[in-house]
Every structure is written in structure tokens, then in C-alpha cells.
Amino acid sequence: MLWNSKLIEKYNLSGPRYTSYPTAPQFSTDISKIALIEKMLSPSKKPLSLYFHIPFCAHLCYYCACNKIITKQYDKGQDYIELLDEELRLRSLMIQQDQPVTQLHFGGGTPTFLSTDSIKALFNKITKYFTLVNDDSGDYSIEIDPREIDVEKLHCLREIGFNRLSLGIQDFDERVQKAIHRPQSIELVSKVLNQARELNFHSINFDLIYGLPFQSVESFERTLNIVLEMGPDRLSIFNYAHLPERFPSQKRILDTSLPTAETKLNMLKLTIEKLTAAGYVHIGMDHFAKAEDSLTIAQKEHKLKRNFQGYTTHKDTDLIAFGTSAISHFNDTYIQNHIDLATYRRSIENGQLPIAKGYIATEDDLMREYVIMSLISNYELNYAFFSKKFNVSFQGYFLKEHEELTVLETDGVIIMNDQKIQVTDAGKLLIRCVCMVFDQYLNNGTRYSKVI
């Protein structure tokens, strides 16, 4: 990937991450819940992707912007599973029983907050209502806090069917860890990693964050060197967005401790150079994977997709999400659950789906979604494929956007011809800017993170 400082300086704007289109700020509480439920009842033969949000954490990490509940009362996990059981039952009434679950993900919060028995109980409940694949061919993943896992729990995860792990690392520098209230040693992470490999998990991902307090290019390079020695299959390396007015825990991070914008860019540049030199492929934005990884292969075959969990190889699935704040997506419909646990509980206990808000896409939305997801996943858009899918000329429909695209082409971000838009090597870091050309909802007052 070509690093062009002048382009980055010009286009380092703020914009959505495009885990959906329209993005979540467009979801409305005014939409008819009956209309959303009718959409759920529309028959589908697609495989399923299931997501479960486990909101509990035993420790508060100051940087975190996730929907979470901090508690040391581990019995709350079992109580939450009983609520999920009823949501599972209600949602299972709306699907075809022969739809296989090819993808499953537990996110949070900290999913490993749940006890071994609670994890088994939840998995049994999922199996009761949905058709899980039992030959280890699905992508069944879970997010791990290395401080909230032991070999017994790891063994349980592998035994019941999980085959992918994502470990929250963030940074190995002790000063940085202290500042973000997340102490975890290299030895602890190595131990969890080695145990997971002994149990034959298919793939292990590390999450890192750059832009945290007291980070420097030199300190982050030390962390990267340790990570490369450990050799995870995938890496997600996020840019820390400091928004203390939205996330109160971030008020504990002093502005004066944060690296400058220039330092952050240098950390990103270093990251890309070191990882690609070590054989990792920069999939896009904050994702890296080894050359033989299924994520890399899917991108080469144009089968990659982006959703609320990031990039995924399961392009043709309906996403059904469970738990507080979880977002489902199928066909033209998005549905988000209640964020607040008490409100979520009341809905479930009243025998109702915990729908907070949603969105039903228009034909225009679907066309723009196709364009944005093609660009952000594969760095190109084929006009003929678009025209075949929507029975309309791409150049004719997006005539208004052509002027902005021409500017991007002049600047070397994209290349256009009669057949397609191709993002250049220098433009790949600016992919969110390319996608923003097709976004009809940008000027709605929502505050977004910087694109780099």
C-alpha cells in the first residue's frame, strides 16, 4: 500500500466506518414495529449468521466505547442467559428450520465474563432453536479478555464448537496499560495463545489500538514486535477516538497524555509497513490477515463483506442478533435491540421482541449500499454487475456524484474507465472518503471519527 502524505493530509476527514448503509444514526424509533416484524416473517433460504451481545465486564477499560455493564456479580450472566433464551425462542419462530448457522459470534462487553457452565447453557439453548453445523466448518468466534479466561473455559469453548478467538490486547506497554486501566502481561497473553493453539482453534485475532495515552512510535513498535513474534492469524488495529463527552469513562484519560495527530499517523504508517513486510495482507481499514487466511482469500475472490463485526467471509447470510444493543440485518431491513438492560428485560418478560428502532431501506439505499460495500470490501466497483443487479445504468444513476469522483480521480485516489471504479494503492487508506461520495445522509449532525 502506497503512503501518500499529501493525499492523507487533504482527505483525513471525519466519516462513517460503514459497517452498514445507511449507518446506525439513521435507524429510527418512529418506524412501525409491526412493519419490522412483518419483514422478519418474510421467508428466506439464506444461511444464518448469529450474533450475541454479552454486555458484562468485570473491569472498566477507560478507552472503551462499547455498550457495557461493569460488575463483579458473575451470577448476572446466568440471569441474562435466561432472557436470551426467550429472545431465541421468539426469533426462532420467524425462520425456516433448515437454515444452517454458518457464522456465530459472541461479542461484548466481555463474553468470557460468563462462567463455563453459563457458556454451555447458552450454547445448548442456541442449539435447541437453531441448526448449528456440527462438522467444524462454520466460523464460530468469541471475543476474549485474557484476564477472564482459563484453560478449562478455553477447552469448553473448543469442545462446544467455537473455532475462532479474538483477544483484546490493545498495547503491551505497561505505562499505556496503566493509563487505560487494562493491565495484562505478555506472559499471560502468551499462555492463553499457546493453550488456544494446543486446542486447535482455526484462527486467532489480536485487537490493538493506536492513539492511546503515552503511546509513541517507538513504544508501539515494541508492541508490534512482540505481536509479530506471537504470530496471530489476523490483526485488528483500531484508531482510538477520544470522545469523553459521549463516553464518560474516557474522561479519566487526560488530553495532554494523548499522542499528536502526526504521531498517530506515523504509528499507522509503521504498522502497515511492519505487518506487510512480515507477510500480512492489509485487508482494509484496520484489518490485517496472513496470506493464507480465509479473509485474504475471500477478498481475492470478491466474496468479502463488511458488517457490524468488521470484515467477514460470509457474504450471503442473514444476520440475526441477540441481546442488548444488538443489530440484525436481513434483506432491506435493520433492527436494533434496546440498549438499556432494564428496558430489554421488560420487553422479554412481556413476551415481546426487544425492538428499540430500525430501518427499512429504499431502493436508492440498496443501490448505494451495494456500491459502498463493493468499494470498502474489494476496492473496486464493476458497472456491469451493478447494472445487472438493479437494471439501471451506474453512470446514469450517479450522475450527480460524478463531479466528486472526478476530483478523487484527479488526486490519484481512484481510477475510472468505462467498466469500473478502481481504488488506487494510495487511495486504499482513504476508502471511507470514496464511500462518502455515495452517502446521502452525511449532513445529519452526527459526529464521526477521522477516516485515518
Image (spheres, grey):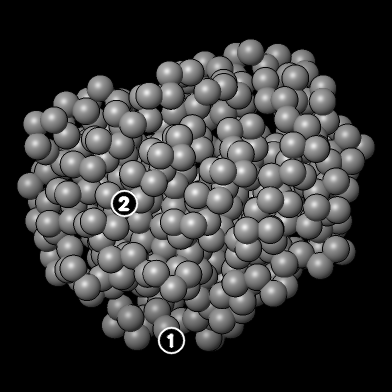
- The residue type indicated by label 2 comes to Asn
For the residue pair 268 and 420, the one nearer the viewer reads as: 268
Query: Which label sits in the foreground, 1 or 2?
Result: 2
43 relative to 251 in the view: left or right: left
Q: Quadrant of residue 213?
A: top right
Would you say the residues marked 1 and 2 are in contact, meaning their CB atoms lie under 8 Å apart? no
For the point 74% across and 44% down, which residue is it?
191
What residue lies at 36% left-to-right and 61% top-to-bottom? 49
Position of residue 207 in the picture relative to residue 375 (left or right):
right
Mark 1 closeness class: few <14, some 14–19, many ≥20 residues within 10 Å? some
Q: Is residue 292 visible?
A: yes
x%, y% of residue 276? Answer: 81, 63
Residue 416 at x, y = what percent? 60, 77
Please, what secondary structure does the residue beneath circle 2 have? Answer: helix
Count neighbours of disc 2 (C-alpha within 10 A) and say few if under 14, some if 14 to 19, many if 20 or more.
Answer: some
Mark closer to the chain start, 1 or 2: 2
User: Residue 207: x percent and y percent?
Assistant: 66, 45
- Label placed on residue 384: 1
Question: Which residue is identified by label 2?
Answer: 124
Gap in angstroms between the C-alphas marked 1 and 2: 45 Å
- Indicate the position of residue 28 as horizontal and vertical percent values: 24, 39
**Residue positioned most to the right:** 218
